[in-house]
Amino acid sequence: MTPPFLDRADAGRRLAASLMRYKDLHPVVLALPRGGVAVAHPVAAALHAPLDLVLVRKIGTPFQPELAAGAIAEGDPPELVINEEIGEAVSPAWFKAEAGRQIEEIARRRTLYLGSRDRVPIAGCTAIVIDDGIATGATMRAALRSVRKAQPARLVLAVPVAPPEVIARLRADVDEVVCLMAPDLFGAVGRFYQDFPQLDDAQVIELLDAAAARLGP
């Protein structure tokens, strides 16, 4: 199978075409870095919307860091989602300490990516949360719940691709889902892109700076 998306920018342009009805509804585009920023950038440009981040970190396990025991997203207080099946296998003390470490990393990354720029106001706006795809949904659920606390008028999840069962679970956290593809045979997000390199911090900063410059002071 030839992957349907050329790269993240291509996926973003296609996603933007499905979101144009929000152009006049005070949209705010919120990306999960790093890969989500490259998808969200053309969406924000097409909607003439500000681009900001939802910073969320996976909480791994002490024996397998890539295995998600949960996820935590920025907020006051931070939004914590626990993977019940895996989270119960680690000690509460370790989990609490790891969550604290990830909150510190979230704060560091916001300063790195956005410097002294203020957060884009979300209350009363249409908040569109974007990533380059969803696999299990744990980090996205934490992100969506964090954004919901900011009281947007409408909360939209927009992604190029995700498994149908994950989309079904996340519908309870949003007002609308826009997902271009939901194949039953999923695998990994990267298999749906012809070009799917890891973005580095410098590329994320460049995209965010360009989005801020487009809107002016």
Image (tube, grey):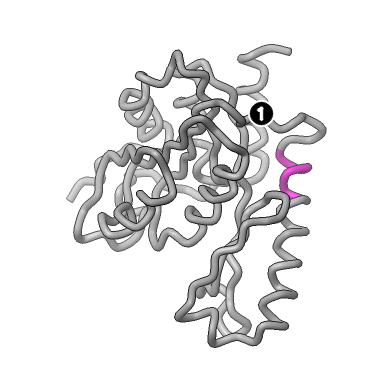
Q: Which residue is mark 1?
A: 121
x and y, in percent, of residue 56 in the image = 60, 54
x and y, in percent, of residue 58 in the image = 58, 64
- Seen in the picture, residue 127 relative to 73 is either above or below; the reply is above
Residue depicted at 42% across the width and 37% down the height? 156
Element type at mark 1: loop
Question: Where on the picture, by quarter, is residue 158?
Answer: top left
Residue depicted at 55% across the width and 27% down the height? 28
Name the amino acid, label 1: Pro
Residue depicted at 48% across the width and 55% down the height? 141
Q: Nearer the viewer, residue 19 or 171?
A: 171
Q: Nearer the viewer, residue 39 or 5?
A: 39
User: Magenta residues?
Assistant: 108-113
- Seen in the picture, residue 58 relative to 86 is either above or below; the reply is above
* Neighbours of disc 1 within 10 Å: few (<14), some (14-19), many (20+): some
**Residue 112 counted in the magenta span:** yes
Left or right: 132 in relation to 181? right
Q: Nearer the viewer, residue 121 or 123?
A: 123
x and y, in percent, of residue 175 in the image = 39, 39
Prevailing SS of the magenta stretch: helix
- Seen in the picture, residue 210 relative to 76 is either above or below; the reply is above
Left or right: 191 in relation to 197? left
Left or right: 1 in relation to 199? left
**Residue 5 counted in the magenta span:** no
Q: Quadrant of the C terminus?
A: top right
Question: Where on the picture, by quarter, is residue 184?
Answer: bottom left
